[in-house]
Amino acid sequence: MTKHMRTEVYSDELVRSSNIYNQLHVAITFLILELTDAENDMNSALEELSKTTGHKRDSYTIISDELVKEQIDLLKTMQVSEGGNLRRLLQKESAFDLAFEGQHPIVTGYPDWINDLFPYFQPQDVMCQISDDGGTIIRIFEDDFLAVPASVHESFIQVWWPIAGQVAEPGYLKKVAECVWASFGLER
């Protein structure tokens, strides 16, 4: 099906912008989740300590710390800035009819067939055939892979995987070998 679709080849600048935008999204979300978990764990430990000592302890706060908030806000500002650059470059380089939104994911409307390049489930025989034909492999989890036809340029995969990948948080891609990419998202 995707053999008849016209994929695009993108500039290094667009690929870089997409990678930075999506790496920032993963980093910010991960940082907030980890800090919140640490804060909750610490407060649970303080509550247990209060039960044994009989002294009420003040809650432990990380997320509301001014320095932490400033750093997270700085990362968010960088992501917004890179999102504007990504949008500008994608509008300039893509002939697809695209719709944009101000938040992640930045591209909300695009041709439906792009989703088919990154299915949630891909039969093993299909994946093996695509791989044998020189296609690109995307490693999603340790033992979970996806194959994209060789006719799809790596720049197209790098830009569209974070947008159209059918896992909940596709994240971003890093090349690990020739025609093999690893996906780094919040589920990994």
Image: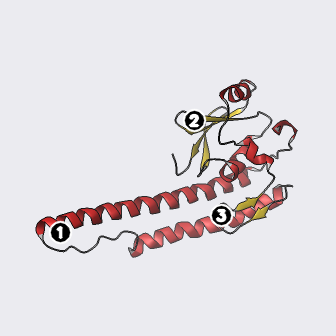
Residue 82's disc number? 3
Residue 117 can be seen, yes or no: yes
Q: What amino acid type should be assigned to the residue bearing mark 3?
A: Glu
Q: What amino acid type should be assigned to the residue bearing mark 2?
A: Asp
Which residue is at 82% across, 45% downward? 7
Contact? badges 3 and 1 (CB < 8 Å): no
Q: Distance between the residues labelled 3 and 1?
A: 46 Å
x and y, in percent, of residue 85 in the image: 71, 64
x and y, in percent, of residue 24 in the image: 57, 59
Is 8 located above or below residue 33 in the figure? above
Number of other residues with Cα within 10 Å of mark 3, as a class: few under 14, some 14 to 19, many 20 or more: many
Which residue is at 84% across, 36% downward? 3
Tell which circle, 2 or 3, labels the residue nearer the N-terminal end.
3
Q: Is mark 2 on a helix, strand or loop?
A: strand
Q: How far apart are marks 1 and 2 (CA)?
A: 45 Å
Q: Distance between the residues labelled 2 and 3?
A: 30 Å
Which residue is at 62% across, 45% downward? 173
Q: Mark 2 points at which residue?
A: 144
Left or right, residue 63 beside residue 171: left
Depth check, front residue: 70 or 95: 95
Q: What element carries label 3?
A: helix
Among all residues in the image, which is located at the extreme left? 53
Tell which circle, 3 or 1, labels the residue nearer the N-terminal end.
1
Q: Mark 1 points at which residue?
A: 50
Q: Is mark 1 on a helix, strand or loop?
A: helix
Is 143 located above or below residue 108 in the figure? above
Number of other residues with Cα within 10 Å of mark 2, as a class: few under 14, some 14 to 19, many 20 or more: few
